[in-house]
Image: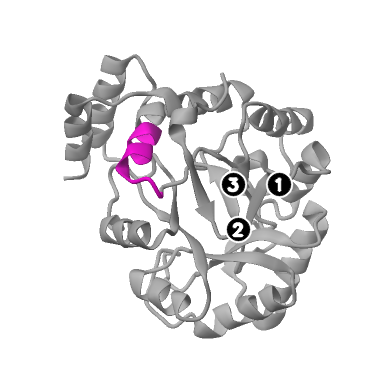
Amino acid sequence: MTISPIVGTYTMGDRTVKRLGYGAMQLAGPGVFGPPKDHDAALAVLREAVAQGVDHIDTSDFYGPHVTNRLIREALHPYTDDLTLVTKIGARRDETGAWLPAFSAPELERAVHDNLTNLGLETLDVVNLRVMMGEAHGPAEGSIAELLGVVVDLQRQGLIRNIGLSNVTAKQVEEGRSMAQIVCVQNLYNLAHREDDALIDSLNEAGIAYVPFFPLGGFSPLQSDALNAVAAGLGATPMQVALAWLLKRSPNILLIPGTSSVGHLKENLVAGDLVLDEAAMTALDAIGG
């Protein structure tokens, strides 16, 4: 089953993509660190995603590190013109796999060049600046001007086509938009965590894509029970329902569900065909109430 045309498309700067994409993070080893358990299976997932109609893959060179980008290059290079690769910079991994900020100008510049090298590109389609200012790695207020200035300079050099932001507050998005054309924002958002409701709506008005991560992250047992009940009534999986709700939530939402399994990949793509009626939407909306 390929991606349904009812999912539609959205723009990220000079790129137009289908709203249901693929996130490559889970192709790396446990904890997004080290090589995959099954190298050939990882390549098969990437190739099947494209065969199924996916034209938007989210990745980063700090996944592994270097692992997912090299897998993408091995599986899909040379890339078709309609395939958009979105990567992230602003973090690094230490020898234990810990996630650490990497915000200095040399670190950001090196990250862009590492992404270019490992993906086999001369220019990156979209680069998200991942902001890690909070102690718990969640969004925290603080100016991003110095960091974003480095990314803007790399864009002027022709190494980046489009700029996005990740793990940011509404105020940081506003600051970013005063410095550059921001084409997407990637934050935590799902049925149970809707702190970005107002931001999603304002970005939609501005024609800016919003890409939620962890579509099933942080659910309480009661919230999970409610989701499971709706899914059972629709003959679908909880993940399919959660993704379908996000697609219906706002037309600027793009999805990047990740998996290391071809079977699970196909299950996720079915979310584009899932129709949520009024009763289902009412029950799902109540999960975040």
Task: Report which residue position mark 2 lands on.
Answer: 14
Dot 3 or dot 1, earlier in sequence: 3
Choose between 164 and 67: the one closer to the eye.
164
Q: How many numbered marks are there?
A: 3
Check disc 2: other Cα within 10 Å, few if <14, some if 14-19, many if 20+: few
SS class, disc 3:
helix
Give the percent coordinates (x, y) of residue 273: 42, 23
Q: How far apart are marks 1 and 2 (CA)?
A: 24 Å
The x and y percentages for residue 52 are 62, 26
Q: Label 1 belongs to which residue?
A: 68
Find residue 64 and report its horizontal and vertical position in percent. Answer: 69, 51
> Magenta stretch mostly in which secondary structure?
helix
Marks 2/3: CA distance?
Answer: 33 Å
The residue drawn where x is 63% and y is 75% is 151
* Coloration mode: one colour
Relative to the observer, which residue lies in front, 253 or 137?
253
Q: What stretch is highlighted in magenta?
A: 242-252
Residue 71 shown left or right of residue 8 in the figure: right
Residue 31's label in the rendered image is 3
Q: Sort mark 1 into few (<14), some (14-19) or many (20+) by Cα contacts within 10 Å.
A: many
Q: Is residue 110 left or right of residue 210?
A: right
Question: What amino acid type is highlighted by mark number 2?
Answer: Asp
* Circle nearer the viewer, 3 or 1: 1
Q: Could you say which quadrant of the image residue 204 lies in?
A: bottom left
Q: Does the magenta stretch include residue 120?
A: no
- Which residue is at a point 31% across and 22% down the rendered structure image? 231
Amino acid found under the numbered disc labelled 3? Gly
